[in-house]
Image (tube, rainbow, N blue to C red):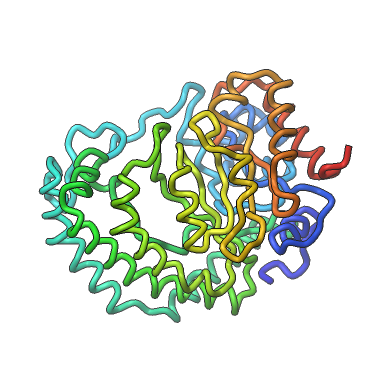
């Protein structure tokens, strides 16, 4: 175990991950983006977060009773001011007037394919051929140990950012041209998925070894936006044919190593949920209920091995927290607990909590997390 002497909160998280019976329900990380609210919860002075973001962010996570986190993102709220993102550079998916990759203007689906064939395919082939698994094991363990040491014994560090799978590269090329390429030239895009998987099988073999040799907490959150509020970004039959087999192949080493893989949900991902379970995903985090994610139905599903799913249930950061009342916040927390799995349930926000959430709602939310952490489902 990375942290040999765990505090009470971290132990609650580890016991829940392991499927042991627990009285309390662990609190997952919160990412409050409004600086004044973050500082208030952390017991810091106004302006202190900007001066010392890592120290204040860590104090905040301890103050709200965080039991475990997978992402350590202490400077993330610095990207926002009181009214949202300020001064961020425009990229392929955030309104860039022109997308240029490796000197090639991406202005059509054909340009996407040209870049893949000229640049990405040779790059991936070289990466697969020269992949050093021993070095990757050492990198993973060093990174996880460093972050666990920084967090201390009361917050358990779980996995994020070092297990991979073939991605839809709209973030490089822009949504429109990439998704048109996926529809018009599936054979080219499948080659891209296959080459990504060739590299990632090697990476994920190293990750499986790191879990075994380093005795890492056996939980890992996968994160890739594949849906919007209307449904899947790409035709599900196309994904079944050209993406899912390579997705499954890339993850097989960590599935076989009994690492509990969970999936971050953005948008209406319901069409993909059964397919993820078939591959070996064993839980979910996120849930945009307002977009059609059926929380109760998902919580009643089983993993491929027949076990209950691991669920990180979140109070909605797009509706309930910013637009509801304290009573609404409490009502949703109660519902998440009542409808969630009997074992393997954790609580947090559905995503980052943006500026504008009323203080009374945020305070009610944090108080509710404390209640369920201490009392579990007890009345």
Residue 347 found in image quarter: top right
Q: Is residue 361 above or below residue 311?
A: above
Q: At 70% across and 67% down in the image, what residue appears?
A: 3
Where is the C terminus found, in terms of image quarters?
top right
Location of residue 378 in the rendering, given as x and y in whole percent from the top left corner? 87, 41
Residue 344 found in image quarter: bottom right
Q: What residue occupies the far right of the structure in this picture?
A: 379
Q: Is residue 148 above or below residue 139?
A: above
Q: Nearer the viewer, residue 3 or 322?
A: 322
Location of residue 84 in the rendering, given as x and y in whole percent from the top left corner? 46, 26
Q: Is residue 310 left or right of residue 154?
A: left
Location of residue 1 in the rendering, given as x and y in whole percent from the top left corner? 69, 71
Q: Is residue 154 left or right of residue 303?
A: right
Q: Count the marks.
A: 0
Q: Is residue 182 left or right of residue 64?
A: left
Q: At 18% across and 49% down in the image, what residue appears?
A: 101
Location of residue 113 in the rendering, given as x and y in whole percent from the top left corner? 14, 53
Residue 181 shows up from this direction: yes
Q: Is residue 307 above or below residue 322?
A: below
Q: Is residue 210 above or below residue 150?
A: below
Q: Nearer the viewer, residue 206 or 332?
A: 332
Q: At 40% across and 37% down in the image, what residue appears?
A: 231
Residue 363 shows up from this direction: no
């Amino acid at each position: 175990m990375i942290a040999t002497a765990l505090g009470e909160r971290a132990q609650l998280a580890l016991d829940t991950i392991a499927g042991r019976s627990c009285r309390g329900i662990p609190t997952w990380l919160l990412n409050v983006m409004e600086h004044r609210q973050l500082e208030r919860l952390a017991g810091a002075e106004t302006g202190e977060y900007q001066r010392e973001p890592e120290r204040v962010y860590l104090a905040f996570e301890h103050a709200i009773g965080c039991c475990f986190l997978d992402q350590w993102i202490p400077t993330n709220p610095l990207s926002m001011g009181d009214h949202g993102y300020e001064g961020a550079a425009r990229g392929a998916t955030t309104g860039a007037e022109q997308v240029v990759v490796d000197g090639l203007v991406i202005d059509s689906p054909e340009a996407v394919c040209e870049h893949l064939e000229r640049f990405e395919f040779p790059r991936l082939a070289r990466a697969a051929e020269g992949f050093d698994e021993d070095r990757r094991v050492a990198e993973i363990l060093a990174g996880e140990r460093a972050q666990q040491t920084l967090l201390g014994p009361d917050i358990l560090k779980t996995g994020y950012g070092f297990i991979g799978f073939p991605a839809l590269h709209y973030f490089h090329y822009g949504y429109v041209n990439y998704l048109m390429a996926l529809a018009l030239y599936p054979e080219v895009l499948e080659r891209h998925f296959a080459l990504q998987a060739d590299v990632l099988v090697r990476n994920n073999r190293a990750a499986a070894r790191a879990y075994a040799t380093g005795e890492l907490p056996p939980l890992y959150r996968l994160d890739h936006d594949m849906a919007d509020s209307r449904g899947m970004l790409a035709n599900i039959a196309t994904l079944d044919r050209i993406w899912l087999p390579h997705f499954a192949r890339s993850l097989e080493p960590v599935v076989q190593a009994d690492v509990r893989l969970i999936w971050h949900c953005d948008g209406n991902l319901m069409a993909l949920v059964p397919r993820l379970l078939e591959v070996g995903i064993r839980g979910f985090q996120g849930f945009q209920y307002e977009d059609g994610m059926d929380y109760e139905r998902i919580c009643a599903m089983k993993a491929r091995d027949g076990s209950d799913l691991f669920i990180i249930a979140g109070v909605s950061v797009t509706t309930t927290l910013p637009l509801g009342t304290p009573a609404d916040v409490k009502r949703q927390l109660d519902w998440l607990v009542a409808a969630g799995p009997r074992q393997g349930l954790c609580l947090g926000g559905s995503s980052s909590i943006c500026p504008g959430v009323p203080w009374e709602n945020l305070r009610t939310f944090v108080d509710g997390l404390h209640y369920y952490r201490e009392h579990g489902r007890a009345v």
